[in-house]
Image: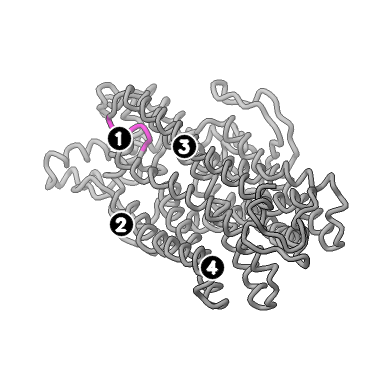
């Protein structure tokens, strides 16, 4: 049996690297389309200011893109080093979208990023615009294939377990690709990136407006970000509801944790606005509720029941009992693949194989045939993830989404009245808003991944089985090393971003009086250092 501490440290290491990496991803996804929009206006109107905007924001995009790639590369290697059993178990399925992402989307994106960065003087306006759109397409295709892989972990579709090879095997690629969880999560994540980029552009533009620098560029960027952001925020909230609807059916245990629902209540059930959940007592120590809201919010009906923790644990007990014969048959097939009785027994119980694996952790000598009712009860409790962190991270994410919607509505109102620079309180608020979408994206990732526990592949492969057999010392050393390395990456990102924001768009080599800001027509090293 793998050391529980090793499993915990493996989870911490992957969570840390993923959370660091995900600080870069939303900004990359969103900035590509904002750049394309700016350059489209430049090509259609011929106004130089929009070229300056595309070049300036493009420089910040390149910094973020380079460091995002650096932090993302190690994650794919972690599957082989720290999660070797998982890689062997689902490699046929999980490897396919990651390989497509690397061969098609990532190389496409990287190639066109180079053309976008160095092609301003070598390509025509239309050619460069096409390249910029291809960068945006490549970035979002990268996200698509990664989320297809993640979608399989959340709601495994298009694969079957082969008892003779002891592996999951892909049998329906369209089902894998068009999994409702994967597709909804892709759209939700992409639009969250557009919100992130809009807040970032709006905040930096507000900084220039507060300093009365680069006013023409700042005002136009502010307006585009405000309009882009209000639409994206409305979209991300709407699609978040759709994702919750799909996820609630695919993962009812995650839904129960998100809503701190310990007991199944008659519909329409109340919505817990705030609560203090107790995992040990399986109840809320305190709640603030709105009656009758949860059922229509989750099921889009007033009569459909939403299962609570008590119902889900009772269902898990039955599935564990049904999964034990599947594990026993699998053990016999590993010795004799042609055992007809074992094959028949496995076929009858294979739907609950993962639940049999779940109780194996508690069974004496990991022999599920020796599992007691107490062991089964422990495993059944495991199917409910940690409620308190999921409940609160979900609410923080939602609260930040509503805050950003109100923020963008105000920004649109000010920019359409053409008096945003007069509202200095709002411009200062815009600076403080820059971290908000990043935190919201991190909260969303935590809800998705913590809510999947105790499974690496939902209802098929428990997390305790998926990790590699490393020593605790190795895991502590590698975790500390990654923490240090990724902290350096974040520090480099912050330094370069702040440096080039302070330099401003004049660093591109031109800024005429018509474009506003600074000294008329000045561009020199001395001007850049101001």
Return the residue nearer the eye: 69 or 351: 69
* Residue highlighted by disc 3: 486
- Please state the horizontal and vertical placement of residue 236, each as a whole percent of the image: 64, 55
* Residue highlighted by disc 2: 170
Q: Nearer the viewer, mark 4 or mark 2?
A: 4
Marks 2/3: CA–CA distance: 34 Å
Q: Quadrant of residue 83?
A: top left
Residue 324 badge: 1
Residue name at image x 30 percent, y 45 percent: 350
- First in sequence: mark 4 vs mark 2: 4
Q: Is residue 249 above or below residue 519?
A: above
- Please state the horizontal and vertical placement of residue 501, each as a whole percent of the image: 65, 49
Q: Which residues are magenta?
A: 462-469
In the rendered structure, does residue 489 fall within the stretch colored magenta?
no
* Residue highlighted by disc 4: 132
- Please state the horizontal and vertical placement of residue 22, each as a whole percent of the image: 52, 45
Indicate the secondary structure of the residue bearing disc 3: helix
- Crowd around label 2: few <14 · some 14–19 · many ≥20 (10 Å): some
């Amino acid at each position: 049996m793998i050391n529980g501490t090793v499993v915990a440290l493996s989870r911490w290491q992957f969570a840390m690297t993923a959370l660091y990496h995900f600080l870069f991803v939303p900004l990359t996804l969103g900035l590509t389309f904002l750049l394309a929009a700016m350059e489209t206006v430049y090509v259609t109107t011929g106004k130089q200011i929009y070229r300056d905007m595309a070049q300036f924001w493009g420089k910040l995009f390149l910094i973020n893109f380079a460091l995002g790639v650096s932090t993302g590369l190690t994650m794919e290697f972690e599957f082989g080093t720290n999660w070797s059993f998982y890689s062997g178990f689902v490699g046929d399925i999980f490897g396919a979208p990651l390989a497509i992402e690397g061969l098609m989307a990532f190389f496409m994106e990287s190639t066109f990023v180079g053309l976008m960065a160095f092609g301003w003087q070598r390509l025509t306006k239309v050619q460069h615009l096409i390249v910029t759109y291809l960068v945006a397409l490549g970035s979002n295709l990268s996200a698509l294939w990664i989320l297809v892989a993640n979608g399989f972990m959340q709601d495994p579709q298009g694969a079957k377990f082969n008892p003779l090879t002891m592996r999951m095997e892909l049998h329906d690629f369209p089902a894998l690709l068009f999994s409702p969880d994967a597709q909804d999560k892709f759209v939700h994540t992409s639009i969250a990136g557009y919100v992130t980029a809009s807040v970032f552009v709006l905040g930096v533009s507000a900084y220039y407006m507060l300093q009365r620098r680069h006013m023409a560029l700042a005002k136009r960027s502010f307006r585009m970000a405000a309009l882009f952001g209000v639409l994206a925020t409305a979209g991300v909230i709407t699609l978040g509801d759709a994702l919750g609807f799909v996820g609630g059916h695919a993962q009812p245990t995650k839904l129960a944790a998100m809503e701190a629902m310990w007991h199944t209540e008659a519909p329409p059930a109340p919505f817990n606005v705030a609560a203090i959940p107790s995992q040990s007592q399986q109840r809320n120590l305190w709640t603030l509720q709105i009656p009758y809201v949860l059922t229509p919010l989750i099921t889009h009906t007033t009569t459909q029941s939403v299962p609570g923790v008590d119902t889900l644990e009772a269902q898990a007990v039955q599935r564990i009992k049904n999964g034990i014969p599947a594990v026993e048959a699998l053990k016999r097939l590993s010795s004799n693949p042609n055992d007809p009785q074992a094959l028949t027994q496995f076929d009858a119980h294979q739907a609950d194989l993962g639940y049999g694996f779940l109780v194996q952790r508690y069974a004496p000598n990991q022999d599920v045939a020796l599992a007691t009712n107490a062991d089964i009860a422990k495993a059944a409790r495991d199917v409910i993830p940690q409620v308190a962190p999921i409940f609160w991270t979900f609410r923080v994410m939602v609260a930040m989404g509503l805050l950003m919607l109100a923020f963008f509505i105000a920004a649109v109102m000010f920019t359409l009245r053409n008096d945003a620079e007069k509202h200095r309180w709002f411009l200062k608020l815009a600076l403080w808003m820059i971290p908000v979408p990043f935190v919201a994206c991190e909260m969303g990732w935590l809800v998705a991944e913590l809510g999947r526990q105790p499974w690496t592949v939902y209802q098929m492969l428990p997390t305790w089985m998926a990790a590699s057999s490393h020593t605790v010392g190795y895991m502590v050393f590698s975790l500390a090393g990654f923490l240090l390395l990724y902290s350096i990456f974040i520090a480099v990102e912050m330094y370069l971003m702040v440096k080039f924001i302070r330099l401003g768009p004049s660093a591109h080599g031109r800024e005429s009086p018509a474009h506003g800001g600074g000294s008329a027509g000045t561009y020199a090293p001395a001007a850049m250092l101001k």
